[in-house]
Image: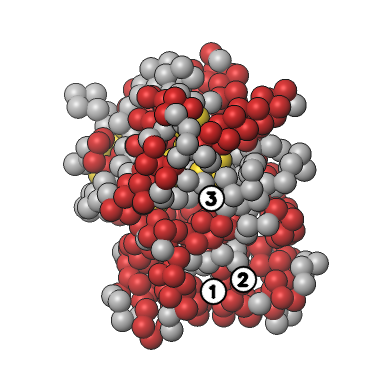
Amino acid sequence: MEHDEELRRKVAVFTNSTLHSDTSPPCQNPGPRIAALTSWYECYYDVWLGGHCFRTIAKMHQKYGPIVRISPNEVHFNDLDFIDSLYPGAGERKTNRPVMVGKQSGTPDYMTATEDHDMHRRRRAVINPFFSVASVRKLEPVIRQHTEKVLARLEQATEPVEMNLLFKAYANDTVVQYAFGVCFHFLDDAECGKPYFKAVDMFFSLNHLFGHWPFIGWMVGKAPGWVMRNFGEGLREMWRRKWYWWIQKVGEIRTSNDPERVKSTIFGGVLNSSLPDAENTDLRLASETQLVIFAGEGTTANPKISSTHPSILATVKAKLSSLPDSPSFAQIDALPYFNAVIQETIRLHPGVSVVYGEYVIPAGVTYGMTPTILHKTASVFKNPEEFRPERWIENPKLSRAFMGFSRGPRGCIAVNLARREISVLLAALLVKYDVYEEGGGKMGPTLQVFDTAKERDIDTNSEYIIPAVARGSKGLRMVARR
């Protein structure tokens, strides 16, 4: 590919200068000299300031251009023309994962953190079929069942609803049901599983700490259950589900006499795959469960569906009015404006933050891009901070700049599930509710945004592999008016 050759040329020039930055003049070294000399620079923004390195990287690109050195072993790109070269299609080029990703997760044995390209491909090949369009289509009855539970909770709510929490429960129940044939029933829980999700968020907040000081992640991963259970209700609940419930369900599937459960669940497929026995231990599959659940939750659990743009949602509702009361995903997916609204929402609030480099030349130098930065680059997206779904319809070529679900052979495995969940739920909400506008004269059921500030509760404030809002924020909250 032409871009491959251009990329190699630029990288060769760049790394030749930066790897010898102690003797190269500053003009040959894009990025702060301190970043090329020590990873403490990145660590300061990642750990001490709490996931703010992506902000610093954005400023570097504004100052130094489309390629910058952000640590001694990592180069960051912000160039639309090199997306396909950095994140090639499956089989085009080996894409080893940086070791740091496994360190950040604390579970280096699960698929996403797998360093070796060939091992990652084997592990992913087993799970891939369960997230194909055809397989996810069969899951639509479960998605609709959980959608009805979301609507019922909104109908019964007497207090403002934390939509982040409700959407997480919806996404979690769906993907866990698919993984094991049973779920946690967070949508039936009075708190929507709040202690569990708080503990998950806390663990995500430790990702950078584990990445820069892997021995801490190692100790946490090796800590006995009785230690972790003494660190508060949420952590106790998470640990119980992860190391007891998950392993128990894997064991049940392993010994199940129900061929339908074995055939139709993700881990039934994994256990009956061609992977060697060493790959199917309870411990590794519990770690793999973490991947499947987080992949299924990620973007789906993001409830920022243009909630602060009622006029846009009114247009979407009008488009939906031509469909049956319970439209199928195929009917919803055929509405260009509906898809544009979802695409625009994920552009501004992607489910992934830094897409770690998967192209390593020379050995030891990692390359990557950050969707949050690329999606807000004015040279790519005109008026990037503006929520404008029409941009995707007016210029279909913009889709090549979309990285909301990552890219390449290590892209989000659950993208088809996430899109279906988001579409079915958003359509159901808009069929039932209007979005409240002051003085709008709405007579039917409405959803009103409650005590929600864009900068505090909607916008990305920090990143810990996944984007996060400001600390202490309750996220988007809404009141259901009847």
Which quarter of the figure is the N terminus placed in?
top right
Q: Amino acid at mark 3?
A: Arg
Q: Does 213 appear above or below 401?
A: below
Please say which color scheme the image uses: secondary structure
Q: Could one spot residue 151 in this view of the protein?
A: no
In the rendered image, which residue does mark 2 sit on?
Answer: 285
Q: Position of residue 434 (x, y in %)?
A: 34, 32
Which quarter of the figure is the C terminus placed in?
top left
Outermost residue to the bottom: 226
Q: Amino acid at mark 2?
A: Leu
Give whichever of 405, 221 is nearer the camera. 221
Q: Are marks 2 and 1 in contact (CB under 8 Å)?
A: yes
Outermost residue to the top: 394
Q: Secondary structure at mark 3?
A: helix
In the rendered image, which residue does mark 3 sit on?
Answer: 144
Distance, label 2 to label 3, CA atoms, is 28 Å
Distance, label 2 to label 1, CA atoms, is 9 Å
Distance, label 1 to label 3, CA atoms, is 24 Å
Within 10 Å of disc 3 (Cα), the crowding (few <14, some 14-19, many 20+) is: some
Q: Secondary structure at mark 2?
A: helix
Outermost residue to the right: 274
Q: Position of residue 162 (x, y in %)?
A: 29, 51
In the rendered image, which residue does mark 1 sit on?
Answer: 246
Mark closer to the chain start, 1 or 3: 3
Q: Amino acid at mark 1?
A: Trp
